[in-house]
Image: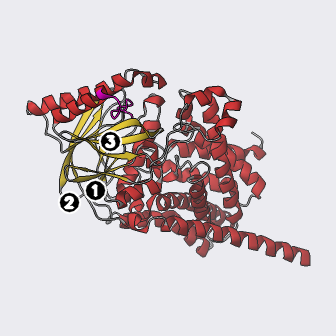
Amino acid sequence: MPRRLLPAVAAALAGLLLYASFPPRTLWWLALPAFAVLGRALRGRRWKPAFGLGYLFALGYLLPLLVWTGIEVGPGPWLALVAVEAVFLALTAAGIAAVSRLPAWPLWAAAVWTAGEAARARFPFGGFPWGKVAFGQADGVLLPLAALGGTPLLGFAVVLSGFGLCEAVRQARSARRTRVVRRGAAAAALLSLLAPFGAALGARAVVDADAEDGTATVAVIQGNVPRLGLDFNAQRRAVLDHHVRETERLAERIAAGEAERPDLVLWPENSSDIDPFTNADAAEVIDRAAKAVDAPIAVGGVVERDGKVYNEQILWDPEKGPVDTYDKRQTQPFGEYLPLRPLIGAVNETWTSMVRRDFSRGTTPGVFAMNGTGVGLVTCYEAAFDWAVRDTVRAGAQMLSVPSNNATFGRSEMTYQQLAMSRVRAVEHGRTVTVPVTSGVSAIILPDGRVTARTGMFVPGTLVGTVPLRSSSTPATTLGTLPEWTLVLLGVAGGARAVARTVRAGRTGADR
């Protein structure tokens, strides 16, 4: 292989290593060598080659990570999404290269990465934070850092340690070659590598799964769908009936003394795509299920109100019927609404037919009072957004539920990636998190990130468990966006320092 191709191969390999660190694999530690290899490829580069190497890194990372987005709609949207998201990573790589000449460069470079993730989580169309480094760390030893500073701090720590590994290896090789140990540089490299692990060890004191407000017995219902793929929407009544049937089976087990009666029941997103407010037959079977189990049910529905369509969670009381609702606030572009509809239609009419009507957004967090428990609702795609989860906890959620519908994505890794997100959120905010999914994997997660129960994929199932309720705030919940913006400003400062240094060097050269 020509030597000049080695950086390109290394960048793509680093991306593949980062992808391999994500669930369903538990190889979280691969993120460290991934960033070590990336750092080696970028260090000292000018911005144009760094941009290109960053793009190759992004392709190695995002192409396999997001392949599930094209399962039912073909490769076009998948490739387009990756092409756009890769630009953010390429720009981030250019920034990393710029600060790589600074003393203690791993610190500046990790902050630049955090700034890149912050931008990607907000732009365009509300952002796409899927694939943040933190979401691959649900099984990692650095996970407790999420309770201190949320996903930005956790991701920063992983990247810092990876770049620290790169610098430590570089310093070791230099010392071996020259027989001179640069103690200050070596100490900085080791500190970058090891400090995140020391901080995570200290942060374990913040992670707590004990009950503060008592406990609640929850039932998570996975009704399954008639068949895989988008066609399940044509069988909306069958999907609803599956969830009713599974709930009634639970009621039979309770009556037989085989299961504990739950305080609350959680159904997934799209468990009733038939609007129960306008269809009496749908309302009747939901009401029947609630009465059978004698507990309130959070039902995921698609409803139309005032000419607008909403992805809505409905609190269904066994005595009073529907008593509260939550409308999804972060709807999915190109899935639940179509940005630039005329332009997209001109390119491919098939894509516009996939999203015939745009879903409207809710405006307030959703916390259902279910038998005395404040259950915060974070619907599917919203779990990827820091603000959506944080707002819900601050609104009074004693536990969280992430109702989702993954049937569209078949048996892909998407459901495992989303489950990992929920585990990180549990630690970040110190809350039990339930994940009711139409077709799997549904789960119950304790506030320390442990999964206590889970289902398989594309099988009906019911999970019943007693979970701790909590109302205290972790530092991450209290501090909000402060850790993220602090790291972003650190990255900006590093970039400004690198630019100033380059300008000074240019002037010095001109004077000579």
Which residue was labeled with disc 3? 314
Q: Is residue 179 visible?
A: no
**Tag shown at residue 152:** none
Label 2: few (<14), some or many (≥20) within 10 Å? few
Name the image quarter holding residue 453.
top left
User: Residues in magenta?
Assistant: 269-280
Q: Earlier in the sequence, mark 2 or mark 3?
A: 2
In the rendering, at what x and y percent does residue 138 appear? Answer: 40, 50
Q: Residue at x 70, y 49 (%)?
A: 53
Q: Nearer the viewer, residue 324 or 164?
A: 324
The reply to whether discs 1 and 2 touch (Cβ–Cβ < 8 Å) is yes
Q: Earlier in the sequence, mark 3 or mark 1?
A: 3
Q: CA distance from mark 2 to mark 3?
A: 24 Å
Q: Earlier in the sequence, mark 1 or mark 2?
A: 2
Q: Nearer the viewer, residue 65 or 358?
A: 358
Left or right: 6 with respect to 124? right
Disc 2 is placed on an element classified as: loop
Left or right: 339 with respect to 135? right
Q: Identify the amino acid type marked 1.
A: Gln
Q: Magenta segment: does it hold 278?
A: yes
Q: Magenta segment: does it hold 401?
A: no
Q: CA distance from mark 3 to mark 1?
A: 18 Å
**Tag shown at residue 213:** 2
Which residue was labeled with disc 1? 398
